[in-house]
Image (tube, rainbow, N blue to C red):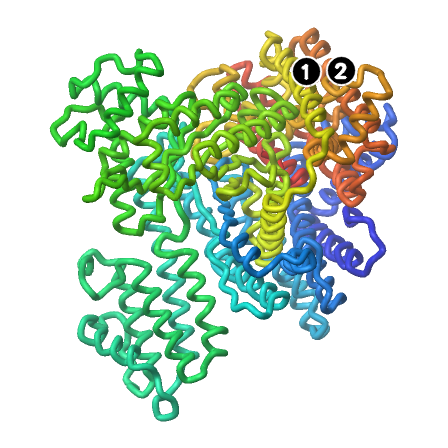
Amino acid sequence: MSELVEAGRSSSNHLLRRDVRFLGNILGEVLVHQGGRELLEHVEKIREMSKALRAEFLPELYEEFVNTIKNLEPEIRHQVIRAFAIYFQLVNIAEQNHRIRRKRDYERSTGEAVQPGSIASVVQDLKEKNLSIDELQHMINDISLELVMTAHPTEATRRAVLDIHKRIANQVMEMDNPTLTYREREKLREKLLNEVFTLWQTDELRDRKPTVIDEVRNGMYFFHETLFDVLPDVYDEFERCLGKFYPEQQWHVPTYLRFGTWIGGDRDGNPSVTSDVTWKTLNMQRNLVIYKYENIIRTLMGQMSFSTTIIDVTNELIDSIRADSEAVELRTVEPWTNDKEPYRVKLTYMLQKLRNMREEQFKGTKQRYHTVAELMDDLLLIDRSLRHHYADYVANTHLKKFIRQVELFGFHLASLDVRQHSQEHENAMTEILAKTGVQAGYAELAETEKIELLHRLLADMRPLVNENTPLSESTKECLDVYRTIYRAQQEFGVSCITTYLISMTRGASDMLEVMVLAKEAGLFRRDDNGKIISTVQAAPLFETIDDLHAAPEIMKTLFELPIYRECVAGMGNVHEVMLGYSDSNKDGGMVTANWELRVALNDLTRTAKEYNVRLKFFHGRGGALGRGGMPLNRSILAQPPHTIGGGIKITEQGEVLSSRYSMTGIAYRSLEQATSALLTSAYLARYPSQEKASETKWEEIMRTVSEDAQTKYQDLIFRDPDFLTFFKESTPLPEIGELNIGSRPSKRKNSERFEDLRAIPWVFSWTQSRYLLPAWYAAGTALQHYAAGEEERLDTLRTMYREYSFFRSLIDNLQMALAKADLIIAREYASMINDAEIRARIFSQIEEEYTKTKQMILQITGQDDILDNTPVIQESIRLRNPYVDPLSYLQVQLLLELRSLRSQGSDDAELLREVLLTINGIAAGLRNTG
């Protein structure tokens, strides 16, 4: 199995091959130890046949391959599945380590040269473009990127398994240490053998669905392991690069890059996310921050042994220690008895004040910190004192990072977004208005009547309900969410929750309902001077194609309302708007979704500009191509530069979190590249290149292509009465619901309607079955319709690919999807469809569209084959496929057996378990699954 390696001649690639071979050999030893030589022989035979089939499809070899899989005894079959799945886990670890190694090799071999995509490269580029210090400072002050973790269930790997992966990764990296002795290398090999052995005997599958709190812990894991240290390191590198290329300025980069989270706040379709869960989430996040700060302070105490017998500290430091000694009782912290070491004395009191934050009895007293500003004041006081006696190096080395961490994480760790479906607010508002005698039948009012009523209620600061108003449990819970937000802002700081997202926003009333309910909890009010104070903002989520079309008019309606406009002004004239990539794709297909999202971005930005409002766009991307997935830096560069002025937010979810943020080096590189992309976009927004006269024409072409693609897509997905049968029977959709990878149901309602299926299982199912249909279907027909066989039109598409960045990105994403799709394997999945007519008719449509799309892309790009423009990725997919194929064939066989049993009213837990193991294995092999 050691051949699954990027092709290349460099010594760096040689090390990747070494690592894969090394880990493959260790896995082979484990297989022999656990299942005997017979198990290894089965695995090797299947692997060799799969490779041969990929090299040349021979019917007799195919028959032998399928029969070999069918004839596997259940116990051997179970182990074969696990062998392939674990092999992919090990390969993924080796490839992640290799990314870190390549970066280090580059920096080591190039000396002062800067790496493309790095912060240094973009700052150097800005300097070469003669960007002045003032212009650069303004640009840095305006940029903003927030990466938001979500609990969307596409991460099929258990935390226990990820922990093993981390240990293996660290040990493999240690193999590069040239100072290791022969015995040390042998011991390292023994450790790795033990870890792979442990991996083999660790259950990959969860025995239950994770709770919301489990998901909160999973999200916090990345802060604990990497982000708490990596984020400030990115800031430090940014300031270092600014100082290098603009040495005449003292730089302090403002907070432009931060992490947020939905986990514990996203209640859309998840009844388990209650106001109590949200409160518990915020407490857990604060406890982690306090734990981190305590460890830092203990480290600082060991480092700051400065003695007043040698140096003079500032009077303000002495005064603050005196004030602390009078106010703070050292209960759980050992007093520092040497009063000649004032920094250690001061840090002792700081440590006690942090610990006291966990106890209710100290609320309102001087024995604890109440705001992050109080902690920051103490740190800056220490910083000034250190510089007073010329300990600048210590301040810059040890204290500066701590100050940055407090700036970034406060006492809340990450801002928690709350999300709820618009229907829930309408239901609550209807009940409240009826029970208080304000308006009967609110839900039946016309949209204009709702807006007029809600605007009037928002302007009236009197509450609608009191503690005696009789309300249903669902409405009480709805109100309790807002009360929890208010309470949280008082306890953890306003930054802990500032955004309330509204799924399925269909009108301005959906936004106004949230603000009226927020007013009930004190989140929207007037101060003594009559100025509107709003500490939470309603943010619409526009998801479907129809929603995207309606979005500009909805926002215009809101901006026209005086009270709402006051609210926006109170938040710095910045308004957040979220765009959903998953549902728009599911609704209209890949081509149409991408085009309509771009149109919505431009139209919304234009609308907001009329009212002097900047929009912060929140891009709800998934990990898979069918849900807007792409590398972080590319997702930033894909946005029209003029649309990022109010800041940008992007969801990070599922397996993307572990692939990007579980290892320090990869987390750093990802965030460094994101910073570089953000600066590049900010520069292009300020200094746009000359608009091409052709671009207007190209947009008209894209509009036509999009319309054709939508018609073709919806003809199959929505208008073919047999499509849903084809989808359910030819993919593992029903079984994916039994894989315990998320607390949230896979459907918005308990229904079989396609509209109620969430976008994640929709994409996950097509990826597992190797169709990847949502990521490419209908593109070929639409492009072919435009070209119409005319060479002149084809030349126009070729020009667009060369010169129109949006079109180039679209075509390249289609290439990636086509390369990962495999209709030979997909045909095996189609064989599970009971109705032969449905199977033959719909599969032939899909096959025809695949061929058409491939042909059109090759004609447009001028390539001989798909992904010729990115040979490294092309080769990686080519080499991975033969190793995923056996898992796909096994999955089909298992699904046929399981579904046959279930159709007879029986079941088999072990058979289901094997199906779920293949799902995990294919997810590991294809990487971005959902």
Q: CA distance from mark 2 to mark 1?
A: 8 Å
| Quadrant position of residue 809 | top right
Residue at 70% across, 30% down? 695
- Amino acid beneath label 2: His
Q: Which mark is residue 478?
A: none
Rendered location of residue 816, percent (x, y): 72, 34
Rendered location of residue 356, percent (x, y): 25, 63
On screen, residue 260 above or below 730: below
Rendered location of residue 636, percent (x, y): 60, 43
Residue at 69% across, 69% down? 177
SS class of the residue under badge 1? helix
- Amino acid beneath label 1: Asp
Rendered location of residue 873, percent (x, y): 75, 42
- Name the side, left or right, on which 915 lies relative to 432: right
- The front one of 743 and 337 is 337
The residue sitting at the bottom extreme is: 309
The residue sitting at the left extreme is: 468
The residue identified by callout 2 is: 785
User: What count of labels does the image hold?
Assistant: 2
